[in-house]
Image (cartoon, rainbow, N blue to C red):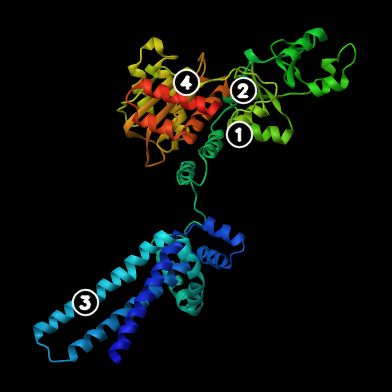
């Protein structure tokens, strides 16, 4: 009977040890943001768990005290069981040594496997499901042994201060690349669409963009002129069909303000409105002004347009609130826009597709692909393209997840978009992630045409997210012609 009681005590202590180990690892592993979400939804266990996480030092001390006491008691019970076996009969010295060795292996093995290893692995797999039900028991233990915890906490704090170690940071700080990696993994597990991931990527990119990246160059801006007859200005309005127009007055190289069509309609008469009288003041910004800051300024000042000047103070472009928002969500087309559709397949040629890239990074892959092409086939000098793509890559990684990267740049003086498709069997090592990109879309667009960049980016996103056929063909194609055929078929399917 005594032997049976010792056996049950051994199993109980083993389970207790396992419970504390499970609690310790699940408390460390569980995401505080997820616990906060559950607590806000009214989950009572999550509310208590949130307190335990906020007091992580005390929580870990509770677990450690429990593990230590359970382990010591387990060893004592194990020793008693061995003693009962040895004193229960007449054993030779050899047999006694074998019994001790076997008992040691059984007790230690049980402790390591069932009391430590299995609970740790279970905590890594269960996390939330383990942490929530253990929160209340752990809180009760904390209350019972609080005096011991207080003493241990003070002693540990004193020793840490002697070692020059202060208190841990209250909040975990994530870099942009770490956040991107978390979101990419969430998307790969089906928790968000690929298009939504691109939206979030654009939010990260917004902090690196300048006004010149989204503005419309002066050469394509339609202006009204206060010095011209109303009939001529009306023709400009009818032909372009915009809502807001820069207004030229005294200086033809610097608009005095802008005109809103609503003001024209409200104040118009049979002879036409006085444009100078209804002109609104305009905001001027530098080409190098951060786009994120411009968005905030437009919201604060309740303006939808701004004129852009270069470093010399000369008028160089025009930007609207819609242009800024398009950098986040992609192209927004209204009822009057009839811009020609830009197709990815029309920009690709077979010599733009390279299926055996040996480079180890996206920028090195771009350099390798450019070196294989005849200089006359390149839109700009290779050094300029590589420098622009590298500058963009240094700002933030262009890896999109699913083994896809999109090195890109907006180049001044580029006449039309230029696209390449690169494939690497061993994969390209991308910044901020351990994953490798096997497909890279290299996208170069004119600096003053942000909408073309957005449309091509959206086309690539749609192809990669909605067509498994295209992804599979890009990975398995044996020739550039097969890749081009897959792009044409996939792009046409998205338009039908």
Nearest to N terminus: mark 1 or mark 3: 3
Rendered residue at 29%/69% (across/down): 112
Rendered residue at 75%/14% (across/down): 238
* Mark 3 residue element: helix
Nearest to N terminus: mark 2 or mark 4: 2
10 Å crowding of disc 3: few (<14), some (14-19), many (20+): some
Q: Position of residue 279 (x, y in %)?
A: 80, 20
Q: How many marks?
A: 4
Residue denoted by label 4: 345
The reply to whether residue 166 is visible in this rendering is yes
Nearest to N terminus: mark 3 or mark 4: 3
Nearest to N terminus: mark 2 or mark 1: 2
Nearest to N terminus: mark 2 or mark 3: 3
* Mark 4 residue element: helix
Structural distance between the alpha carbons of marks 3 and 4: 71 Å
Of badges 3 and 4, the one in the foreground is 4
Residue denoted by label 1: 292
Q: Which of the labelled discs sits on residue 215, or is there none?
A: 2
């Amino acid at each position: 009977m005594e032997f049976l009681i010792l056996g049950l005590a051994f199993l109980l202590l083993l389970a207790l040890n396992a419970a504390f180990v499970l609690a310790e690892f699940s408390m460390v592993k569980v995401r505080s943001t997820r616990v906060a979400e559950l607590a806000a939804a009214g989950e009572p266990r999550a509310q208590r768990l949130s307190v335990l996480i906020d007091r992580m030092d005390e929580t870990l001390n509770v677990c450690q005290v429990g593990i230590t006491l359970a382990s010591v008691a387990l060893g004592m019970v194990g020793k008693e069981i061995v003693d009962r076996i040895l004193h229960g009969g007449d054993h030779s010295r050899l047999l006694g040594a074998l019994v001790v060795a076997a008992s040691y292996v059984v007790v230690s093995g049980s402790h390591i496997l069932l009391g430590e290893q299995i609970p740790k692995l279970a905590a890594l797999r269960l996390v939330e499901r383990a942490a929530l039900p253990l929160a209340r028991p752990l809180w009760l233990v904390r209350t019972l042994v609080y005096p011991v915890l207080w003493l241990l906490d003070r002693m540990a704090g004193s020793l840490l201060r002697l070692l020059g170690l202060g208190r841990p940071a209250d909040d975990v700080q994530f870099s942009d690349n770490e956040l991107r990696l978390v979101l990419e993994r969430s998307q790969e597990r089906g928790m968000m669409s690929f298009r939504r991931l691109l939206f979030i990527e654009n939010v990260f990119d917004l902090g690196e963009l300048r006004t010149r990246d989204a503005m419309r160059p002066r050469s394509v801006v339609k202006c009204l002129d206060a010095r011209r007859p109303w009939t001529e200005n009306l023709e400009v309005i009818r032909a372009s069909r915009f809502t807001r127009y820069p207004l030229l007055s005294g200086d033809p190289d610097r608009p005095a303000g802008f005109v809103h069509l609503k003001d024209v309609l409200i104040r118009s008469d049979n002879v036409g409105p006085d444009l100078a009288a209804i002109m609104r003041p305009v905001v001027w910004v530098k080409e190098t002004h951060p786009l994120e800051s411009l968005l905030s300024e437009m919201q604060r000042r309740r303006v939808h347009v701004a004129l852009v000047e270069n470093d010399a103070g000369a008028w160089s472009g025009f930007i609207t609130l819609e242009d800024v928002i398009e950098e986040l969500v992609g192209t927004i087309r209204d009822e009057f826009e009839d811009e020609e559709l830009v197709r990815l397949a029309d920009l690709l040629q077979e010599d733009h597709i390279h299926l055996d890239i040996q480079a180890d990074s996206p920028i090195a892959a771009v350099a390798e692909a450019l070196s294989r092409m005849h200089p006359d086939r390149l839109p700009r000098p290779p050094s300029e393209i590589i420098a622009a793509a590298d500058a963009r890559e240094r700002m933030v990684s262009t890896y999109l997840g699913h083994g896809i990267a999109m090195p890109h740049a907006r180049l001044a003086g580029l006449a039309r978009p230029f696209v390449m498709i690169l494939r690497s069997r061993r994969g390209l090592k991308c910044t901020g992630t351990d994953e490798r990109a096997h497909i890279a879309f290299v996208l170069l667009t004119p600096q003053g045409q942000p909408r073309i960049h957005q449309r091509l980016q959206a086309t690539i996103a749609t192809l990669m997210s909605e067509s498994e056929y295209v992804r599979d063909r890009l990975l398995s194609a044996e020739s550039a012609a097969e890749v081009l055929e897959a792009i044409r078929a996939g792009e046409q399917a998205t338009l039908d």
